[in-house]
Image (spheres, rainbow, N blue to C red):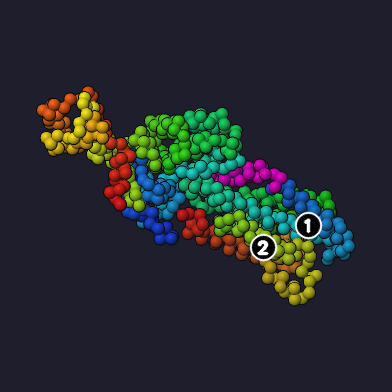
């Protein structure tokens, strides 16, 4: 294993974050704070508690997941897309690194950034609502598993994209709607039976449900199913990444 | 001399069906500078990219220091540094950081003292903290060389290192390349500039349409294919060439004051003595004489034209 290469890629990506602190960290924190102000204080004040949890506190896990998913995808996709765009990928391809090391470097950095962001948002949420975390280790486990899985997904998007529009296409048109409709701001039990059934086809619901369970022991589906879904998603992403490396799809030639 | 890169029957056909390399075989000797000449689309960059691992070969095999570039890619790529044709660099990284990144990527432990040496050698030390986007084109080119040398490679590929570079900088670059060779690095460069190959290469390979049509020692190539010319400045102008001189390969200038005699350096006899005797017999005197040899450029153009 070429550990120096992994460290070089990881440090390079983290340095990029430090250079763009406003965009990488502050902007998501500000937008999340705005969600708390609008949904938590302004609108939330008029909403009754959800299963015994104040609405402001109820949306905290959903908001963290929203940021975690979108930032994991954008960090990882941009990380691998940019060398393709500028042509500096030649260096990666001519270096004595296996693609596993490349993935560990890029995905590790993207997931790290998302986890730092998630922690900051959690702390920010603590300023607006009283927080309680029933199962902190499971919460952390969900956080890490989600950050890694969606960073891998972002890596795939970055490899697939051959222009900036494609880079934004899936995050904006698929992931964001799935997160908003996956119970970030409501419980599935608040929907009509028909929409409850439809919502069950949204994979993000399982992530948010499991994550919320680790906070308040409230869940739309059992925590075991949530874990199974995210592990399945992780396995699917790993399979696609393996195929990309085997074929050199959109990287070589 | 020992072979460090061995290319055997290498072919590359891209997905669209374009065959960029056709059955190329070449042995590159340790410590030499070999220049690959060829027009655009000849396959030079594809050949380099394949050896470096950027492009997958369709057929054939490449051994670097006796190891297969696919099976033993870690070992072979560790030995190779690549300076690409395009100025492809990060924009916002600092000079020192990007060279250090390259060293790490190639599996070497950090060594700030070595990075400092490279940057000093390439006159970039003063710019070590500058962002790359603030560098001039020439500095970026040197930076790419610094990145390629960061992991102490024994083979360096330079893909058109002086493309778009002014004459002064080009000569500076030649000095850098010569110094690298002195340190034992094997250098493979592609170029459009014949004078570049003529100035620094030990051997010349000529590529066209994906084929390596010739590989020869530079001196031997020029000797073998080069024509020499003897130019005589006459004392008095001639209107026509006397019949007695028609057996010589002579050309009379339009003003009648210069005679150009073309001869083959490979021939047993140059025919110069006979020509001078004949001139004396005809009473044609000359003030001065000089010889010229055909340049590599003329040889190259001739070779490429012949292959069409």
Seen at 73% across and 60% down, the residue is A211
Residue B100 location (% of width, % of height): 54, 38
Residue highlighted by disc 2: A173
Would you say residue A3 sits in the magenta stretch? yes
Q: Is residue B221 left or right of residue A29?
A: left
Q: Is residue B122 left or right of residue A209?
A: left
> Is residue B183 among what the camera can see?
no
| Region of the chain picked out in magenta, as a range | A1-23
Pointer 2 indicates a residue of which chain?
A
Q: Are marks 1 and 2 on the same chain?
A: yes
Q: Which is closer to the viewer, label 1 or label 2?
A: 2
Q: Is residue B217 left or right of residue B241?
A: right
Residue A144 location (% of width, % of height): 66, 54
Sequence-wise first label, 1 or 2 = 1
| Residue closest to the far bottom | A194
Q: Residues within 10 Å of mark 1 (few under 14, many from 20)?
A: many
Residue highlighted by disc 1: A60
From this view, report whether residue B152 is shown above or below residue A232: above
Which sits in the foreground, A173 or B257?
B257
Element type where label 2 sits in the image: helix
Would you say residue A149 sits in the magenta stretch? no
Q: Quadrant of residue B170?
A: top left
């Amino acid at each position: 294993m070429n550990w120096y290469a992994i460290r070089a890629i990881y440090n390079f990506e983290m340095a990029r974050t430090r250079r763009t602190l406003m965009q990488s960290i502050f902007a998501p924190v500000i937008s999340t704070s705005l969600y708390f102000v609008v949904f938590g204080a302004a609108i939330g004040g008029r909403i009754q508690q959800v299963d015994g949890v104040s609405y402001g506190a109820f949306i905290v896990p959903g908001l963290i997941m929203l940021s975690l998913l979108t930032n994991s995808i954008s960090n990882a996709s941009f990380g691998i897309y940019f060398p393709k765009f500028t042509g500096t990928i030649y260096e990666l391809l001519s270096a004595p690194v296996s693609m596993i090391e490349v993935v560990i470097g890029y995905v590790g950095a993207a997931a790290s950034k998302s986890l730092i962001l998630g922690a900051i948002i959690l702390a920010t949420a603590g300023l607006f609502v009283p927080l309680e975390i029933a199962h902190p280790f499971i919460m952390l486990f969900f956080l890490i598993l989600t950050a890694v899985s969606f960073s891998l997904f972002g890596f795939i998007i970055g490899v697939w994209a051959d222009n900036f529009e494609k880079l934004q296409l899936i995050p904006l048109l698929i992931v964001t709607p799935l997160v908003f409709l996956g119970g970030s701001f409501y419980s599935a039990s608040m929907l009509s039976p028909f929409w409850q059934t439809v919502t069950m086809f949204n994979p993000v619901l399982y992530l948010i449900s499991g994550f919320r369970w680790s906070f308040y022991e409230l869940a739309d589906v059992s925590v075991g199913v949530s874990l199974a879904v995210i592990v399945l998603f992780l396995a699917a992403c790993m399979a696609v990444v393996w195929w990309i490396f085997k074929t050199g799809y959109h990287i070589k030639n | 001399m020992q072979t460090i890169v061995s290319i055997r029957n290498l072919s590359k056909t891209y997905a669209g069906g374009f065959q960029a390399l056709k059955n190329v075989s070449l042995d590159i000797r340790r410590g030499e500078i070999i220049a690959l000449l060829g027009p655009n689309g000849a396959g030079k960059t594809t050949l380099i990219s394949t050896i470096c691992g950027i492009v997958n070969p369709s057929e054939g095999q490449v051994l670097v220091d006796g190891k297969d570039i696919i099976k033993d890619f870690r070992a072979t790529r560790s030995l190779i540094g690549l300076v690409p044709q395009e100025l492809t660099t990060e924009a916002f990284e600092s000079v020192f950081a990007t060279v250090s990144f390259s060293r790490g990527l190639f599996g070497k432990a950090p060594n700030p003292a070595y990075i400092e040496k490279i940057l000093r050698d390439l006159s970039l030390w003063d710019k070590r903290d500058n962002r790359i986007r603030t560098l001039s084109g020439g500095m970026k080119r040197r930076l790419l060389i610094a990145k390629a040398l960061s992991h102490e490679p024994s083979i360096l590929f330079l893909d058109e290192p002086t493309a778009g570079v002014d004459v002064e900088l080009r000569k500076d670059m030649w000095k850098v390349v010569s110094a690298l060779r002195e340190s034992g690095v094997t250098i493979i460069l592609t170029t459009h500039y014949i004078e570049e190959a003529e100035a620094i290469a030990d051997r010349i390979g000529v590529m066209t349409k994906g084929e390596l049509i010739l590989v020869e020692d530079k001196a031997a190539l020029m000797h073998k294919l080069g024509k020499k010319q003897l130019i005589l400045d006459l004392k008095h102008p001639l209107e026509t060439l006397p019949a007695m001189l028609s057996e010589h390969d002579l050309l009379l200038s339009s003003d009648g004051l210069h005679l150009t005699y073309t001869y083959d350096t490979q021939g047993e006899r140059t025919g110069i003595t006979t020509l001078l005797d004949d001139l004396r017999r005809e009473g044609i005197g000359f003030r001065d004489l000089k010889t010229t040899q055909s340049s590599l450029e003329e040889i190259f153009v001739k070779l490429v034209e012949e292959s069409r």
